[in-house]
Each structure stands twice: as C-alpha cells, then as structure tokens.
Image (spheres, rainbow, N blue to C red):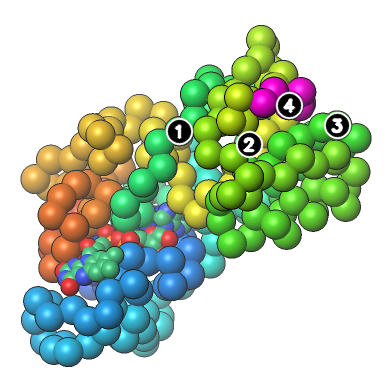
Amino acid sequence: MTDIIIIGGGPAGVSAALTAKNRGKSVKIISNSAELSNLWKAKSVENYPGLPNASGAELMMTFRKQLEDAGIEIVSGRALNALSMGTSFSVSVGQDYFECKAIILTTGIVQQSTYPGEQEFLGRGVSYCATCDGMLFRGKKVAVIGLNEEAESEANFLRSIGCIVEYFDKNRAKKFEIKGEETVAALIADDVVYQVDGIFILRSTIAPNSFLTGLGTDNGHIISDGAMKTTVDGVFAAGDCTGRPYQVARAVGQGNTAALSASEYLDKK
Ligand SMILES: Cc1cc2nc3c(=O)[nH]c(=O)nc-3n(C[C@H](O)[C@H](O)[C@H](O)COP(=O)(O)OP(=O)(O)OC[C@H]3O[C@@H](n4cnc5c(N)ncnc54)[C@H](O)[C@@H]3O)c2cc1C
C-alpha cells in the first residue's frame, strides 16, 4: 500500500510529492495530463523565483522532469472518487483502485458547479465514468454530457457496448437538470425533456464534495487549516483547490506544508 497518494500533478502536487519522498514516504501522483494544469496556459510567469522568463508550459515540464528524476510514479488518468476504509483509503481511476494511508488533494480550480439533481442521483443513474459503469446500461437509453477531451470516444464506447446514446457537447445545450424517483428517469436540457436511464457527466475534474464523503468545501474550495488538513482525517489539500490567490508560489508552498503534515500524520499512526 502506498503511504501518500497525491491527486493532481500541477505545481502543488509536484511540490507535495517531492517533499513526501524526501520524508521517506512512498508516494504516487494520480493526474490528468500536464496540459490540463492551469499553469500550462500561462504565456509567461514573471513572479516565480529561480526560473525567470519561463512560460507556464516550460515550468510544468521542468517540474514534471524533476518528478521523473526523483523516480516518483505518475498514474495518468482522472481520479473519480476516494473511499475511506477506516485506517486507509481506496482511490478509483477508471476501473483501477489504488490504496493508500493518506491523501493530498491538489486538483486546482474546479470551476463547474454540479447540475441540479446530480449529487442526488450520483450512483443511481448518474455516473462520471463510462468505462466503469457502461455495462449497467447495455441496451438502455443514456445521455452523455461531454465536457472533457475523451467524452466523444467514451460516448462511442457506450454505443459499441449497446447503449442508445444521446450526446450533448458544449454547444448543444447549456442548462441541465436531472429528474427521477429512485433512479434517474430524465435529463432536461435547455427545457427539453429526454427520457433516459443513465446520465454520464464527463468532466476533466470532479467537484471536491462528490469526490470524498465528508470533505468540507466553501464556495467550491476545499476547507483546510494552516497545516493543510481538511475536514477528513488523513486527507490534506494544497494549491488553487483551497482558495485564492491562485498563484504558483502559494501552490508550491502549500504542497510542501501538506506533505510535511501528511508525513507527520503517518509517523504518529
Ligand atoms: C492564463 C494563466 C496565467 C497565469 N499566470 C500566473 C503567473 O504569472 N504567476 C502565478 O503565480 N500564477 C499564475 N497563474 C496561476 C497558476 O497557474 C496556478 O495558481 C497554479 O497552476 C496552481 O497550481 P495547482 O497545482 O494548485 O493546480 P493546477 O496547476 O491547476 O493543477 C491541478 C492538476 O490536477 C489535475 N486534476 C484535477 N482533478 C483531477 C482528478 N480528479 N484526477 C486527476 N487529476 C486531476 C488537473 O487536470 C491539473 O493537471 C496563471 C493561471 C492562468 C490560467
């Protein structure tokens, strides 16, 4: 079992991983590609010490190279959720599960709020993963709200296993609502009702409160204290996901603190 799993491979996650490794902990990062870090979009970063005139992409590649040189494993993919197993956690990525003793969340800004009905029907017709749950809807009608790069191929996968797919890209509808009784019965998209048995909402990030039961949030940010502890024992957070200002130096500093706190937590166990 890994000591610490870090979710998100931006500046905060990289910093946390390097410090945790320095503290003698086994560590794994689960992350989307580097291009999905907010830093990648910065044309030039003028206020991060030591690497003047670097573009965001160059900074990210330097950070990732440092991880590689340190021998830190990066699992490529989107972490879907984490389950507390008492003294450990299980993190799911597609159909794979990874176990760890502590988690550091460094997922960056999650801009999307959830749709009405999304939380209520999560696991009862609403899914974030076609590969994991597609088979449950074989021969049935499903809607796919495609908001990430893989959404179209995920929709094609659902078709290939026999689902009848109603696909919504970013332009087809703007407003969604999910209705049902025990399970999902309909998706309302821009006031048009579609009778469906399942709804796949495919984003590149997962809202923190859908990710882990008991994780406190405030306005979409993960609540954390000065030691970067969250409201869940054994779970820490760092970087843009904890609030403003959204800055690389802050993310790196918080990543460092979160890793030290997580290491201390494990040493006391
Ligand atoms: C255009 C632009 C210019 C900027 N310029 C500057 C600047 O000049 N100076 C400065 O200090 N800051 C700047 N910033 C802000 C800076 O980029 C962020 O503060 C910094 O990237 C935050 O780091 P982070 O690690 O918290 O999050 P991010 O860099 O966003 O990294 C989070 C990573 O986690 C991944 N992730 C999220 N959820 C999951 C999941 N469920 N499973 C797997 N992976 C997941 C994301 O895809 C992403 O790769 C700029 C931002 C932008 C957009």
Q: Is residue 213 above or below residue 34?
A: above
Kindly identify the amino acid type of the residue bearing the numbered disc 2.
Ser
Residue wearing tag 4: 194
Identify the element where label 1 is drawn.
loop
Q: What predominant SS class does the magenta segment belong to?
A: strand
Kindly identify the amino acid type of the residue bearing the numbered disc 4.
Tyr
Determine whether, in the image, residue 46 is placed left or right of residue 16. Answer: left
Q: Residue at x 59, y 40 (%)?
A: 173
Residue wearing tag 2: 127
Residue wearing tag 3: 140
> Which comes sooner in the sequence, label 2 or label 3?
2
From the top left corner, tell me how far across and down residue 201 is, in percent. 60, 41
Closer to the eye: label 2 or 3: 3
Q: CA distance from mark 1 to mark 3?
A: 24 Å
Q: Is the residue under label 4 in contact with that under label 2 (CB below 8 Å)? A: no
Q: Which residues are magenta?
A: 192-197
Closer to the eye: label 4 or 3: 4
Identify the element where label 4 is drawn.
strand
